[in-house]
Image (cartoon, rainbow, N blue to C red):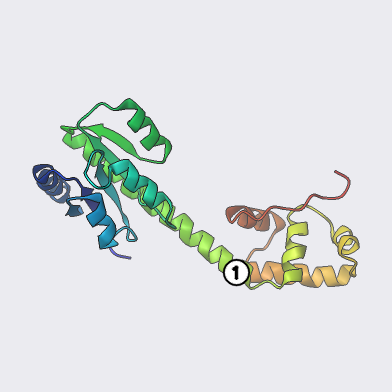
């Protein structure tokens, strides 16, 4: 994977230059854009990194870009910069997942601290996303019956109970269960429960509850 990049989006040329120099002087990659629309057009939001984003810009505001990116499969962490103490905007930005909301002129150390935190968060988020993708690929290898048996297994049902629920033999349940464990790459029910939880597969309601 390529090194992370700090994307600076600000319509003020002097601000862009200053922020770019600051980030590069700290040993990080930086690219700048004069508007949110130019950043979107560049299609640079898929790689690792974070966005340092001005709030008030023509054509598309910072919060509008944040909302647009939230609609995609993955949104990089965002640090907002504002020359105005707009508390409602800051609250909405943070509620929507922004890492920080800093006031211009921004303190050098505050910005670099927020950038480093954002890059760590981005790496962690991408690792989780990759893990979920790997799990989903393994789940896709299950047959419909194996998937059904899996949902009963993670609910805590015994083989005999599963057999009764599905109208099949206990031995057949054992075969399906073994294939589930093999295909998902886990060795215990507890591990299977954790794996399913990471991709939102819920257990069925056991009988008697």
Residue at horizontal 42 percent and vertical 40 percent from the top: 96
Residue at horizontal 83 percent and vertical 68 percent from the top: 173
State whether residue 102 appears in this view: yes
Residue at horizontal 77 percent and vertical 64 percent from the top: 149
x, y percentage for residue 202?
69, 52
Q: Is residue 184 depicted above or below 86 in this figure?
A: below
Spot the residue most to the front.
59
Local secondary structure at mark 1:
helix
Horizontal arrangement in the rendering, residue 132 relative to residue 83 (left or right): right
x, y percentage for residue 5?
25, 56
- For the C terminus, the quadrant is top right
x, y percentage for residue 112?
22, 41
Q: Quadrant of residue 63?
A: top left
- For the N terminus, the quadrant is bottom left
x, y percentage for residue 150?
73, 62
Q: Which residue is mark 1?
A: 138
State whether residue 4 appears in this view: no
Q: How many marks?
A: 1
Instruction: Please name whichever residue, 1 or 19, is drawn nearer the observer in this view of the structure.
Output: 19
Q: Quadrant of residue 151?
A: bottom right
Q: Is residue 85 depicted above or below 197 in this figure?
A: above
Q: Residues within 10 Å of mark 1 (few under 14, many from 20)?
A: some
């Amino acid at each position: 994977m390529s090194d992370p990049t700090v994307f600076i989006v600000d319509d003020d040329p002097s601000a862009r230059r200053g922020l770019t120099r600051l980030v590069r002087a700290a040993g990080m990659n930086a690219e700048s854009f004069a508007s949110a629309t130019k950043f979107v057009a560049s299609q640079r939001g898929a790689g690792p990194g974070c966005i340092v984003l001005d709030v008030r810009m023509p054509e598309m505001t910072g919060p509008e870009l944040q909302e647009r990116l939230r609609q995609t499969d993955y949104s990089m962490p965002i640090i907002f910069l504002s020359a105005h103490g707009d508390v409602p905007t800051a609250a909405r930005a943070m509620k929507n997942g922004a890492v920080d909301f800093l006031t211009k002129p921004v303190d050098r150390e505050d910005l670099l601290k927020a950038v480093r935190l954002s890059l760590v968060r981005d790496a962690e988020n991408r690792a989780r996303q990759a893990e979920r993708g790997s799990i989903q690929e393994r789940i896709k290898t299950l047959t419909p019956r194996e998937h059904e048996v899996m949902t009963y297994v993670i609910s805590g049902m015994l083989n005999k109970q599963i057999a009764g629920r599905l109208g099949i033999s206990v031995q057949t349940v054992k075969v399906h269960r073994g294939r589930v464990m093999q295909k998902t790459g886990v060795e215990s029910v507890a591990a299977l429960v954790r794996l399913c939880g990471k991709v939102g597969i819920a257990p069925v309601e056991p009988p008697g509850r």
